[in-house]
Image: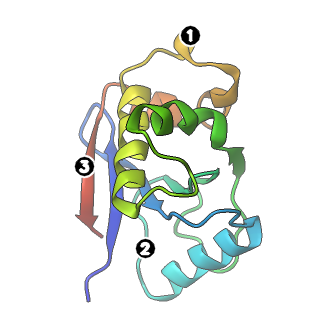
């Protein structure tokens, strides 16, 4: 079976800078996310992107610039995704605890598309981590693809 990532973001030069795995699991702990990432790498699915985001309805975990390091590496950032994704849940008429996997993937893709085409000055404080991590600059002016084979 060939592994796939739910989303890939490319920079303005069409280089992969972000791989995204979207899961509808609620209350995923930092330890759970760390173990999941370790399992991905243990199966030989290496990330060529400098950033890896694990997106849940209520939490984001971001690894930056360490994606190919095997083992249990904790995420660089743990982010409360609720204030970021809540407007998208409202617009779609669903809630974090009832969202389907497909809908959550579309919601995360919509948010990422906005990030790609937004200036840092337009972000609210819940998304400062995008600037601090360098991810916003990395994806600025780029594009997004769904379900890319790794």
| Furthest-top residue in this view | 121
| Furthest-front residue in this view | 93
The answer to whether residue 140 is visible is yes
Residue 26: which quarter of the image? bottom right
- Which sits in the foreground, 77 or 32? 32
Instruction: Kindly identify the residue that appears in the image at 65 percent across and 80 percent down.
Output: 71
- Which sits in the foreground, 70 or 53? 53
| Residue 23 at x, y percent in the picture | 50, 65
Instruction: Kindly identify the residue that appears in the image at 42 percent across and 53 percent down.
Output: 104
Q: CA distance from mark 3 to mark 1?
A: 25 Å
Residue labelled with disc 1: 121
Which labelled disc corresponds to residue 46?
Answer: 2
The secondary structure type at the circle numbered 1 is helix
The secondary structure type at the circle numbered 2 is loop
The answer to whether the residues at label 2 and label 1 have Cβ atoms under 8 Å apart is no
The secondary structure type at the circle numbered 3 is strand
Q: Mark 3 or mark 1: which comes first in sequence? A: 1
Quadrant containing the C terminus in the rendered view: bottom left
């Amino acid at each position: 079976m060939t592994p796939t990532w739910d989303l890939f973001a490319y920079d303005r030069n069409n280089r992969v800078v972000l791989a995204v795995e979207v899961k509808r699991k609620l209350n995923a702990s930092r330890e759970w996310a760390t173990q999941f990432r370790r399992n991905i790498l243990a199966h030989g699915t290496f990330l060529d992107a400098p950033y890896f985001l694990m997106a849940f309805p209520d939490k984001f975990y971001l690894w930056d610039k360490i994606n190919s390091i095997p083992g249990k590496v904790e995420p660089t950032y743990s982010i409360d995704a609720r204030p970021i994704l809540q407007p998208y849940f409202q617009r779609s008429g669903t809630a974090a605890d009832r969202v389907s996997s497909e809908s959550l993937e579309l919601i995360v893709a919509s948010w990422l598309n906005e990030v790609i085409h937004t200036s840092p000055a337009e972000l609210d404080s819940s998304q400062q981590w995008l600037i601090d991590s360098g991810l916003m600059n990395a994806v600025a002016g780029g594009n997004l693809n769904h379900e890319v084979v790794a």
